[in-house]
Amino acid sequence: MEPRLVQAFAARGPIRTIGVVGMGYVGIPSAALFADVPAYSRVIGFQRDSPTSGYKIAMLNRGECPLVGEEPGLANLIRKVVRAGKFSCTADFSRISECDAVTLAIQTPFRNPRDLEPDFTPLFSAIRATGRHLTEGSLVVLESTVTPGTTAGIAREILETESGLVAGKDFGLAHAPERVMVGRLLRNLREHDRVVGGIDGPSTGRARELYLPILTKGRVITMTATAAEVEKTAENTFRDLQIAAVNQLALYCEAMGVNVYEVREGIASLREEGVTRAILWPGAGVGGHCLTKDTYHLERGVALRSADLDWPEGEKSLYLTARAINDFMPHHMFHLTESGLARVHKSVRGSTVAILGWAFIANSGDARNTPSGVFRDLVVAAGGEAGVHDPWVDTEPGVEISRDLDAVIGGADAVAIFTGHREYSALDPARLRAVTGRVHPVIVDGRNVIDPDAFIRAGWVYKGIGRGDRNGHAIVTPK
């Protein structure tokens, strides 16, 4: 006899109506792609009508994309599926009862990373709302990055309590972590392999059925729910580790007076079968929602099972050390700014510093956990003034952000480039120096987007991450 859940799925029939809870950088493109699948008749986006994000409901229902920044194809796809009547957004969570499958993509930050204390409040609230309206034969998929053990543990408990149904018997439950990057959301969802892990075989199979139609190149990789949670947290932890490795190398190169980008090119050139050096790029800091906290979810997962961990005595976690290095980089940008100002007999106190870039990633309006914020706080705490320019970010609570570059640069003693926006690679050093009104302004390049020699010739004091070959240059006074 077939398992009870298999019978429940069969009685429900093929997946036709999908609910997507959370209209953010994951939920919106996922909903649009699901709605574009001919086999799916309708997709409902669920979004709280809150003061900070409720505006998305009306925008999406008008066929407009509320995400800021370049997302190729997304605006057109949203317009298409809304006009076709296949996608709509609502704050009425009772409509989850209409859905054959529900995905949840809610942010999962940490209240206190040092104590490994996550803030699951928004996620658990969404799970409760989903559970209240869950019906037999439906599928629930957590896409949020969570501490390993969450899906089969507390998430399952909440869903069963709210619904009165039993996971694995009356409804399916799985974890299918998102694997997207801002600026390439649709491409990532279509082309990346999709990891899917259910609490049992039927749940895994139903989740595979859900995601397979939106994949154009990627395949579905199946495993258990907990293994899928570990995979996602480890995936981002490894990327964070790679960034930390090259950031540490950049700091070493500065100390030894060499150019990290030359060293990096040599390392990256080693390619042969079975041999690669997947070296990334150094920078002013790591931002965004994922890399800044997913390591802590992995650490928390193993901490909950610490009795089973065999580990070298007295040694710290390699992953947490990597996190500390990446968190240090905006502090290093501050130290470079201090040393640059010292070369012209100034200090941060009483100086004006222009911050170029508030978004954490180039050519995007996504400013979640931006390292620019850490740097700004350091400047202000040291008695300096900080202005912010960003051509992509509109607003930030408590921070004035301008799109007028000259207004931010005017009167600046130092300029710190934090984001690799395309606009910053075309800066004219002579004109920019004239706008500052300073004889020898300081420029600190945190993303290697400018030509050091051009700025040095124009009278700037240059400092750059990993540029030990240039950070001690002779100061030039233009004729």
Image (cartoon, rainbow, N blue to C red):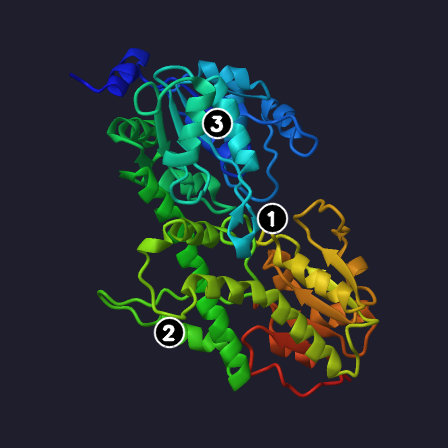
Residue 408 screen position, x and y as percent:
78, 59
Q: Quadrant of residue 413?
A: bottom right
According to the picture, the residue beneath numbered tag 1 turns out to be: 368
Q: State which quarter of the image contains the N terminus.
A: top left
Helix, strand or loop at label 3? It is strand
- Direction from residue 421 to residue 403 in the image, left or right: right
Q: Residue at x 55, y 45 (%)?
A: 109
Name the amino acid type tagged 2.
Ile
Eyeballing the image, is 460 above or below 412? below
- Please report contact status of discs 2 and 1: CB closer than 8 Å, yes or no: no
Residue 133 screen position, x and y as percent:
48, 17
Name the amino acid type tagged 3.
Val
Q: Looking at this view, is 179 or 213 the one in front?
A: 179
According to the picture, the residue beneath numbered tag 2 turns out to be: 267
Alpha carbons under labels 3 and 1: distance apart: 22 Å
- Please report contact status of discs 2 and 3: CB closer than 8 Å, yes or no: no
Alpha carbons under labels 2 and 1: distance apart: 31 Å
Eyeballing the image, is 461 above or below 29? below
